[in-house]
Structure formats: structure tokens, C-alpha cells
């Protein structure tokens, strides 16, 4: 493994990256605003688990394919963007059904849905794969006793945990807003539409980015 000094620099740099608002934080916030804190937490868990696909891919060297085959990167990026936009439109158009007694059932279903959707969103995000490919090698020690692939897995896991902690903080803050506004049916409708619009915006941003 890298020296203690390098590991400290790695953790500090990771924390800086993690707590700068980015797509994952905004996505988790959108799920929280539209569906409640539980759905936001489940979305964060889905993002966290989906990210391990990219960690494993980086360790196996599969992320290099995105550099070697630009068309593959474009296809995955557009697929992820389209999925985000579809989720946003679906959320934006959703209508509350039933009375207040049905709310717990709806939230339970939304939590499971947010979890599964978030895994898909994260797996279809090629920028995560490229981030690991660009960021982690700077802290890999090829002369260490641990093989390079093991160092990728360990450092990637640390990155994922730190980023997920930032997502949890974001969900908690968004949850405070939701708790204050959920007494009003009009506010609930506005929150669903705001969350849906945010997802559509994230999808469009991903699709239009050049890299």
C-alpha cells in the first residue's frame, strides 16, 4: 500500500471531491424531495452498491475500454442520460393517489423503487468508471507487496464510502425540507415536480457533456 503520507493525502482529496455537490448528491436529493427521506436513503444505498461495479471494473482494467472504444462510452452515457430523463418525467407526472392512510405503503414501494433505479443509474454512469481510472492510479504503489488490483479494490472502497457519506448528509438536509413541507398536498406535488425536473436536468447535462 502507499505510505501513510500518501494515504492521508488520498483521504483528504477524496473528501474534497465527495463533499463538492455533484450528480450523485443531486440525484439523492431529488429522490428525497420527490419521495421522502427513506427513498433518499435507499437511493444512496443503491448508488453505493452500484459504484462497486465500477470499482471492480477499474481493478480488472475494464474501464480502459472507455478510452479505447469511444463509441462504447457514448452509448453507455446516452443510455444513462435517457434513463435519468425517463425517471424524471415519470416522477414529474406522478399523481398522488388515495388518502393519507395510503402514504406509508406508497413510501415503502418508493424506497424499493428508488433503490433499484439508483443501482441502474450508477452502473450506467461511465463518468464514474473514468473517475476511478483517472484518480486511483495516482495513489497506487506498483512496488508494494499488495498486487495492484487489490490496491484498486481497497482504495476504491474507501472512495465509495466517503462519497456515500456525503450523499447521506445531502439526504438528511433535504429530508428536513421535506418534513416541513409534507403537511401540504400542494407542497408535496411541488416537491415531486421539483425532484423530477432535477433528474431531467441531470440527464440532459450528462447527455450534452463532451467528456
Image (tube, rainbow, N blue to C red):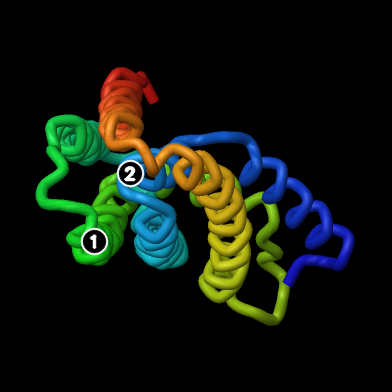
Instruction: Tell me the tag on residue 116.
Output: 1
Quadrant (top left/top right/bottom left/bottom right) for the N terminus: bottom right
Q: Is residue 206 visible?
A: no
Which residue is rendered at x = 38% and y = 42% of the image? 183
Q: Is mark 1 on a helix, strand or loop?
A: helix
The answer to whether 163 appears left or right of 15 in the picture is left
Position in image of residue 66 (x %, y %): 32, 42
Is 74 situated above or below 52? above
Position in image of residue 161 (x %, y %): 58, 64
Cβ atoms under marks 2 and 1 closer than 8 Å: no
Of the pair 203 and 58, the residue shown nearer to us: 203
Of the pair 103 and 82, the residue shown nearer to us: 103
Of the pair 189 and 114, the residue shown nearer to us: 189
Which residue is rendered at x = 29% and y = 25% of the image? 197
Q: What is the quadrant of residue 146 in the picture?
A: bottom right
Distance of label 2 from label 1 (alpha carbons) = 15 Å
For label 2, the residue is: 125
Amino acid at each position: 500500500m502507499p505510505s501513510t503520507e500518501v494515504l492521508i493525502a488520498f483521504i483528504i482529496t477524496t473528501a474534497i471531491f465527495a463533499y463538492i455537490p455533484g450528480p450523485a448528491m443531486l440525484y439523492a436529493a431529488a429522490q428525497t424531495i420527490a419521495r421522502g427521506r427513506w427513498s433518499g436513503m435507499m437511493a444512496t444505498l443503491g448508488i453505493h452498491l452500484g459504484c462497486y461495479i465500477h470499482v471492480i471494473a477499474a481493478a480488472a482494467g475494464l474501464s480502459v475500454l472507455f478510452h479505447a472504444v469511444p463509441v462504447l462510452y457514448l452509448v453507455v452515457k446516452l443510455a444513462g442520460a435517457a434513463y435519468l430523463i425517463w425517471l424524471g418525467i415519470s416522477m414529474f407526472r406522478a399523481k398522488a393517489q388515495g388518502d393519507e392512510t395510503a402514504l406509508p405503503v406508497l413510501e415503502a414501494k418508493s424506497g424499493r423503487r428508488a433503490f433499484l433505479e439508483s443501482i441502474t443509474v450508477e452502473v450506467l454512469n461511465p463518468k464514474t468508471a473514468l473517475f476511478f481510472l483517472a484518480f486511483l492510479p495516482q495513489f497506487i504503489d506498483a512496488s508494494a507487496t499488495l498486487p495492484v488490483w487489490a490496491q484498486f479494490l481497497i482504495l476504491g472502497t474507501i472512495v465509495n464510502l466517503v462519497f456515500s457519506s456525503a450523499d447521506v448528509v445531502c439526504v438528511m438536509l433535504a429530508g428536513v425540507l421535506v418534513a416541513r413541507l409534507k403537511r401540504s398536498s400542494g407542497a408535496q406535488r411541488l416537491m415531486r415536480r421539483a425532484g423530477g425536473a432535477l433528474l431531467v436536468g441531470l440527464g440532459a447535462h450528462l447527455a450534452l457533456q463532451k467528456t
